[in-house]
Image (tube, helix red, strand yellow):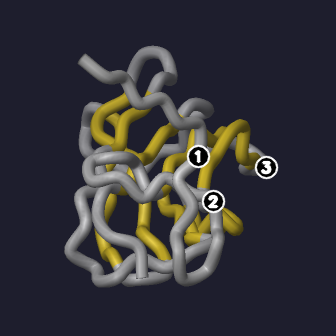
Amino acid sequence: MSTLSVETIDQPSTGDSQPSLVGSAKMWIFFDGSGTISIESDFNVSSITDNGVGLYDAQFSNNMANALFAGPASGTSGSGLGDVTCATKTTSKTDVLSTNTAGTFADYDGLDVSVFGDLA
């Protein structure tokens, strides 16, 4: 039996080092969505925009091949958190919406989003 161990896979056409394996997250972000929003940790995110209470845009550093990607999202804030979803998706960004248990848009301090699909 042989074992293959690698730390980085280089894409032959560009030499860029990035996860390109099937099933790996092509973008993820953990951010504080309350008050002045701030990115706590991320991969393949160029910026996040606050578009109002519970409404954000996460822009990708490297575009997706199409808008048919999976975008699971969740929140880690305390009580009252209802739902966190990826709404409108494009090749360059995804909208993130957060609501409280009553279904009203609300800001929370711990929101996370992942994107699974193909990079452009």
Q: Position of residue 72 (x, y in %)?
A: 29, 46
Q: Nearer the viewer, mark 3 or mark 1?
A: 1
Q: Earlier in the sequence, mark 2 or mark 1?
A: 1
Q: Nearer the viewer, residue 1 or 50?
A: 1
Q: Which mark is residue 8?
A: 1
Please tell me the numbered disc located at residue 36: 3
Secondary element type, mark 3: loop
Q: Is residue 89 left or right of residue 112?
A: left
Q: CA distance from mark 3 to mark 1?
A: 35 Å
Q: Is residue 41 above or below residue 14?
A: above
- The residue to which callout 2 is attached is 17
Binning the other alpha carbons within 10 Å of mark 2 as few (below 14), some (14 to 19) or many (20 upward) gives few
- In which quadrant is the C terminus drawn? bottom left
Image quarter of the N terminus: top left
Q: Are marks 3 and 1 in contact (CB under 8 Å)?
A: no
The residue carrying pointer 3 sits among few (fewer than 14), some (14 to 19) or many (20 or more) residues within 10 Å by Cα, namely: few
Distance (Cα) linking label 2 and label 1: 6 Å
**Residue 104 horizontal/vertical position (percent):** 33, 48
- Element carrying mark 1: loop
Q: Are marks 2 and 1 in contact (CB under 8 Å)?
A: yes
Residue closest to the eye, 77 or 103: 77
Q: Residue at x 41, y 30 (%)?
A: 4
- Residue 95 is marked as none
Q: Which is nearer the eye, 87 or 23?
A: 23
Q: Residue at x 41, y 73 (%)?
A: 119
Amino acid tagged 3: Thr
